[in-house]
Image (spheres, rainbow, N blue to C red):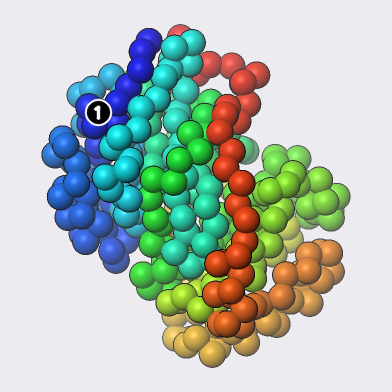
């Protein structure tokens, strides 16, 4: 294994229905050294990333999601060293366009080309944590570099869906149930619990921010009430049907619904008031977000043979 320079690796842009995907792809194409490969419209998260691995030629490759805008040219000056870490997925930080959070959610990843052929996640998994995200199966290493911006609020639906999914992912440990949610929420590690609370509260100053807040609240409550099946997290049809309840609502309706869910959050012992426009903007400007660099879990067995 060796040191890999981002400028030398294939870049695969993965899009499905993101409203800003074409614009983000054009931006990426203008700033990459190697012409980016586009994988579009593949149903299922695992299948889309597997298709990306098949399309890449270099031994490692980079993935950029459709709602992600690369911060060029800084990212392409980065390098990673995978000596003794041949199976590691390198995760770069991204800044959320609605709530300002900076961590790996939605960010750029650097993959070993052969890894995705040896794991089963999301819609290809047998359920449980494997259905949640790649990091429950693959070993991850946070590079700690801010490489991109996740533009998740292009439409009310996309803001709602992204927040719903992330609220479930952040609160899930694989041991919870409708009867034990209170204990498991208290045991969430910092900064995960803090990230979750920010998703529930911050973003009213951003376009479609109220839909992100509502999505996070609905997702968290649905999951802890036992009414959300983990295997649906990668199911676009599930979210399309869920959205039917909110399709005809406007921003004021969304704010009313989000506030009505505050009582349920209070019962769950989560104090996350919705910050108004001015306070939300102030919060994002002053919040200190320490950078973490290192392996998520070195004890996880390698998925590669």
* Relative to 180, 32 lies left or right: left
Image height check: is 17 above or below 170?
below
**Residue picked out by circle 1:** 9
Residue 48 position, x and y percent, is: 33, 41
* Residue 258 placement: quadrant: bottom right
Q: Nearer the viewer, residue 120 or 283?
A: 283
Say which element carries label 1. Answer: loop
- Work out whether residue 218 can be spotted: no
Q: Nearer the viewer, residue 10 or 161?
A: 10
Q: Which quarter of the image is occupied by the N terminus?
A: top left
* Relative to 108, 287 lies left or right: right
Residue 183 position, x and y percent, is: 85, 50
- Work out whether residue 138 can be spotted: yes
Residue 230 position, x and y percent, is: 59, 48
* Relative to 128, 103 lies left or right: left
Residue 214 position, x and y percent, is: 58, 73
């Amino acid at each position: 294994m060796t040191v890999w320079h981002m400028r030398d690796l294939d870049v695969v842009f993965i899009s499905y229905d993101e409203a800003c995907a074409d614009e983000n792809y054009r931006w990426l194409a203008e700033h990459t050294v190697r012409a980016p490969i586009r994988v579009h419209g593949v149903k299922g998260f695992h299948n889309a990333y597997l298709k990306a691995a098949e399309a890449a030629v270099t031994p490692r490759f980079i993935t950029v999601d459709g709602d992600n805008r690369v911060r060029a040219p800084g990212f392409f000056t980065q390098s990673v060293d995978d000596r003794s870490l041949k199976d590691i997925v390198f995760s770069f930080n991204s800044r959320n366009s609605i709530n300002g959070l900076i961590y790996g959610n939605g960010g750029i990843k650097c993959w070993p080309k052969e890894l995705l052929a040896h794991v089963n996640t999301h819609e290809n998994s047998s359920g449980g944590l494997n259905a949640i995200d790649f990091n429950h199966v693959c070993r991850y290493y946070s590079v700690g570099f801010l490489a991109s911006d996740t533009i998740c609020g292009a439409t009310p639906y996309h803001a709602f869906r992204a927040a719903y999914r992330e609220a479930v992912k952040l609160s899930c440990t694989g041991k919870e149930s409708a009867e034990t949610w209170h204990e498991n929420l208290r045991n969430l590690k910092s900064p995960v619990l803090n990230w979750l609370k920010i998703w529930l509260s911050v973003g009213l100053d951003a376009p479609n921010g109220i839909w992100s807040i509502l999505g996070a609240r609905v997702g968290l409550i649905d999951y802890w009430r036992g009414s959300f099946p983990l295997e649906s997290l990668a199911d676009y049809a599930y979210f399309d049907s869920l959205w039917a309840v909110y399709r005809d609502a406007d921003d004021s309706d969304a704010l009313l619904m989000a506030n009505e869910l505050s009582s349920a959050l209070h019962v769950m012992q989560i104090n996350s008031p919705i910050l108004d426009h001015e306070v939300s903007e102030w919060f994002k400007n002053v919040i200190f977000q320490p950078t973490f660099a290192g392996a998520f879990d070195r004890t996880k067995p390698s998925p590669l043979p």
